[in-house]
Each structure stands twice: as C-alpha cells, then as structure tokens.
Image (tube, rainbow, N blue to C red):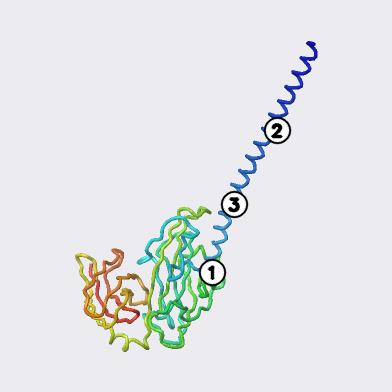
Amino acid sequence: MDRLCETTEKHIMNKNYIYIGLLAASGFLLSFSANESVQKVKNFSKNYHTLNQAGSPGGRTGAPGDGTCTQCHAGTVQSGSGFNSVTLLEGGNAVTEYQPSTTYQVQVSMATNNVKNGFEIVALNPNNTVAGTWTITDGTHTKTITSGGKSRVTHKLAGTSLTSWSFNWTSPATNVGTVTFYLATNQTNNNSSDNGDIIRTSQHPFGSQAGIAEVSAKVETQIAYQENTNSLNIQLNSKVDGSVFVNVVELNGRSVFTENLGHVSAGESALSVRLDNELKSGIYMVNVSVDNNMTMKRIFISK
C-alpha cells in the first residue's frame, strides 16, 4: 500500500513538472514572439526613415492639398521664413518676376551648416495646379517626383550632405499670374531615427513681368518701414477681395521673408507685418499680392 502511494505521488509530481515546463516554454515563446514583433516594428520604422534619406515620398511641402514632413518625422512644423530661400536666376542674374516660356536656374538654400538635410519644392499657379516644368541639372543630388498629379523636386541620398541645391524651372507659356514656390526643408540631427529633426515650410511667390501693369491697376500700396518695431506698415487700396501675401526679396532675387496677412475686402486697409530680426539693413523689394494680384515697392530697412 505504501509503495502504491509512493508511486502515485511520483506520477503526480512528474505530471506537475511537465505541466510547469510546458507553461514556462509557452511563456518563453510568447515573450520571444512579442519581442520579435516589437523589433520588426522598430526595424520598419528605422528602415522607412532610412528610405526617406533618398528623397521625400512627395506631397510634403505644406502647399494646398499637401501634408508636411512631420507625417514621417516627429515634431511640429516651424516657419521657414528667413531660413529657407528660393532664388530664380536668368543668365546668372537674379530676378523677382518671371517671363513666360523662360528657363531659370532655381537655387534652394537653407541658412545652416548642418551636416544632413533634405527638401521638397513644388510650383503652383493661383488655381493651385502645377506651374511650369522642372529639369534636373544635377542628377547626383536631386531628382523629380510626382505626387497628387504634381511634379516636384527633392534631394537624393548623396544630396543630404548639402544645404543648397540647384535645378532648372521653365515658366508657363502664358502669364498665369503669381507662381508660388512651396518649399519644405528638413534639418536633421543625423541619428537615424524620426526624432529630433526640424521641419520648416515657406512660400515664395514670383509674379509675371507680363502682367505687372495690369495687376498693379487692381492693387495699390504705400509701404513704410518702422524701425522701432521692425515692421512694415502697409496702406493697401485693393479693387478685389482676397488673401494678402507679403514677400520681401533681396535685390539679388533671394526671397527672404513671406507672410500671409489673411483676407481683406475690396477697399482701403491698413496692415502691419513684423519682420524677422535676422534681416539686415539694406534695400529690398516688397511684393504685396491680393488674390494673386501683385504690386511691388522698393524699401530701405535701417537698423
């Protein structure tokens, strides 16, 4: 009887050991599976970020209908005014307006010495459709992409070491009004993740020389620089309703400040816009557009 009990107890203990062993093995497998899944997610995130080093996936400029680079990079969008710049060059000379059917060299620059950067740019007419065509002149560092039916230019992997890129843009065959270049830049911290990067967006409008006289008849301005507030006081007389954009351009054609002042009704308006402190003393061209009807004034900023 004692041997039978002893045998029974051993049998029960062996079954318990097997049961405990199975539970432990199951826990290990579940833990391994969970860790493997987490690692796959981490690897996917890292690989996706790495893929974007070869250029924006498109549709990240902040233009109407676009998203921004924060769809892939953590953080919030900052203003690129005074940091991003777009310059149109014709025969080596910078211009502030375009002529129809003319090819210009476009220079996109970031005001930084950062070691790893990126960009995407798109050119749109007042109807927010593509204006003009791109031609890549530096295939090592830049490329064209299409997103939302709109052609754009972005960096390539070799171009992430630069802070300035150039390519050609051919203007529309006819005067389509103000063409706005929507630019997004990414100043990365080069840590191979989506955290810590700085995304900046900016708008750079260029009017058509062919339409300046006609457009100016719809919008009249008087502009004065106020030194104590570092701002522009704008007396606006507009014959049309619409959104007001201000674009400050250096004489070399580089757009250095842009601002959307909101909607105004036809008639007279008194507006004020505070400039970036980084702007130096000098002569600038100020483009003011209402519903894409533009006028231009020369001002002197004294600090």
Q: CA distance from mark 2 to mark 1?
A: 57 Å
Instruction: In the rendered structure, find residue 141 and report the number of the disc placed on it.
Output: 1
Q: CA distance from mark 3 to mark 1?
A: 26 Å
Q: CA distance from mark 3 to mark 2?
A: 31 Å
Mark closest to the chain's N terminus, 3 or 2: 2
* Residue type, numbered disc 2: Leu
* Residue type, numbered disc 1: His
Instruction: In the rendered structure, find residue 83 and report the number of the disc placed on it.
Output: none
Quarter containing the N terminus? top right
Q: Is residue 233 left or right of residue 204?
A: left
The residue located at (44%, 73%) in the rendering is 107
Discs 3/2, front:
2
Which residue corresponds to mark 2?
Answer: 22
Displayed quadrant of residue 205: bottom left
The residue located at (21%, 78%) in the rendering is 268
* Residue type, numbered disc 3: Asn
Label 1's element? loop
The residue located at (64%, 40%) in the rendering is 30
Which residue corresponds to mark 3?
Answer: 43
Residue 207, position as x, y percentages in the image: 37, 81
Dot 3, how many residues are within 10 Å of its Cα: few (below 14), some (14-19), or many (20+)?
A: few
Residue 81, position as x, y percentages in the image: 35, 66
Residue 131, position as x, y percentages in the image: 46, 80
Mark closest to the chain's N terminus, 3 or 1: 3
Displayed quadrant of residue 257: bottom left
Label 2's element? helix
**Against 172, is 192 above or below?**
above
